[in-house]
Amino acid sequence: MPKKRIVFVILSPVFKHVISQQNRMSTTKYIFVTGGVSSSLGKGIIAASLAKLLQAQQYRVTIQKFDPYLNVDPGTLNPYEHGECFVTDDGAETDLDLGHYERFLNVRTSQANNVTTGRVYQSVIEKERRGEFLGKTVQVIPHITNEIKHRMMLLGESGDYDIIITEIGGTVGDIESLPYIESVRQLIWELGEENAMVIHLTLIPYLSAAGELKTKPTQHSVKTLMESGVKANVLVCRTEHPISDEIRQKLALFCNVKPSAVIESIDADTIYDVPVLMQKEGLDKVVLQTLKLNDPQTSEMSKWTAFLEKFKNPKQTINIGLVGKYVELQDSYKSILEAVSHAGAMNETKVEVHSIHSEFLDESNIEEKLGGLDGVIVAPGFGGRGIQGKIDAIKYVREHNIPFLGICLGMQMAVIEHARNVTGIADANSTEMNESCEAAVISLMEEQKAIEDKGGTMRLGAWACELKEGSKIHSIYGQTSIEERHRHRYEFNNFYKEAIESSGLQASGINPETNLVEVVENPNHPWFIGVQYHPEYKSTVLSPHPLFVAFVQAALTNYRDK
């Protein structure tokens, strides 16, 4: 009879780390949010609201967005096409929904939080060119779907999150979305139904002629989803009218979900109401039950509700002008509008934002457009259209002591206006508007001159800035060293710095590595600041950006002094 042997295995630290990583990955839960019937129903807001509720129950949550378009990123998309391009600390140009994620969760996102079909295909093609597929025929399944699944799981590999919410762009049934839906099907099969689930956001239209809500579009949307092998665990139903118990039962029966998993998402006064409404509907509880997670029974939403209380019960109202080139589409300046809302609530003030198209603004109507405002923001943008209107607006607010905040291009136009009308450089301009201008007070950054590709090549992401002690910007931040996010190619030309400063426009923020001017301010004006960076990207509900808070305070002072 052979002797039995006992073998002791001593795991190396590296192998222990691998096992630890796998254990953490196995506990990460995945939620996929899909949309049906119609686009623009608010998947991003629903995803962010659910994440907020789960975060309030002490779960570590992040959100990622998968977009079906072939652009590598939104960086080259027209704002009229896609709204604003949101920028992360690591320099990723992303979908504007990432702005909602950060504003709701107060957690920074990154390149990994936004993936497009263009990026997926680019990665797969690059692998094929390197020979990584060993001569295999590259196909949508398994190569594209494997790449999608890899990126869907990437954030979970860190072990930093308990729950990862993935928003799938587009609408179920779209050709572009099919590889993503198939990837979701595969992941649910691989991870198990206790570790992955689907929330389907759909529309319940109201037919005024019949006087009733109709469920048939939702039934067909769920059927289309099931034809792809994916079952919705929860239905979130956008509606203009309350959903009756009878409709809930009908949707549950025909869509194969529990009645408690039919969630009403009625039109809200503000997007910041949505987490509270979803909590009342029990969305977070249904999700936790589906994923077999403990419901702590306590939800820390006191700071959120305190914000809502201030937001909805202001003590006064002020009027702010937003001078921009893309004002026809509000999403073009989404982060600025939300940052102003956060600052308004902090100051217990309602901020009425008046969009003013710079292309149609000139000296003949500027008094009518700007005369009654308490403050003016000149917004970012690209190209020469509407530039003179921005310059005229800045001249008006400078001469009439109206609080001014210029962002990116707005800051550059403030420099040009001052150079022309105060310093005396009559032909001051930017090489973005006129490549052959003789007095380029704003010029193309040196490292940009050899760049031909437009996508992802600007000065992007978080960069350091040293603030001049004693300046207004220093008093606002309360510190000398800051980091803010950038998105630009052109800069203040230091050749003109001495002349411009001697005539009254102070360079009060400088990048310590490049010596680029990041902030200008006019100490002879009650409140006049221009910043090369985008402070709006870092403003959140619970941490309003200090620059916007100070700007609203200045506008409030101007309002009271009238």
Image (cartoon, rainbow, N blue to C red):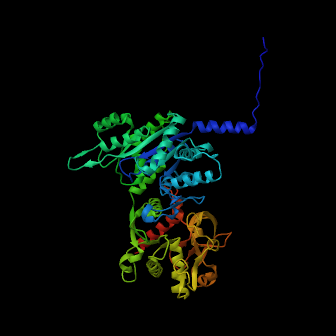
- Kindly indicate the quadrant of the structure image that contains residue 150: top right
Which image quarter is the C terminus in? bottom left
Across and down, in percent, residue 314 comes to: 39, 59
Q: Residue furthest top?
A: 1
* Along the viewing direction, whichever of 448 and 102 lies nearer the viewer: 448
Query: How many numbered dots are placed on residues in this image?
Result: 0
Which residue is at a point 38% across and 52% down the rendered structure image? Answer: 39
Above or below, comparing residue 441 to residue 160 in the picture = below
Above or below, comparing residue 288 to residue 354 in the picture = above
Which residue is at a point 44% across and 38% down the rendered structure image? Answer: 229
Side (left or right) of 239 relative to 177: left
* Along the viewing direction, whichever of 51 and 325 lies nearer the viewer: 325
Across and down, in percent, residue 104 comes to: 49, 52
Across and down, in percent, residue 306 comes to: 45, 51
Across and down, in percent, residue 196 comes to: 50, 38
Which residue is at a point 38% across and 33% down the rendered structure image? Answer: 258
Above or below, comparing residue 270 to residue 225 in the picture = below
Q: Is residue 52 visible?
A: no
Side (left or right) of 394 relative to 1: left
* Along the viewing direction, whichever of 163 and 278 lies nearer the viewer: 163
Q: Residue furthest right?
A: 3
Which image quarter is the N terminus in? top right
Q: Is residue 128 visible?
A: yes
* Along the viewing direction, whichever of 509 and 410 lies nearer the viewer: 410
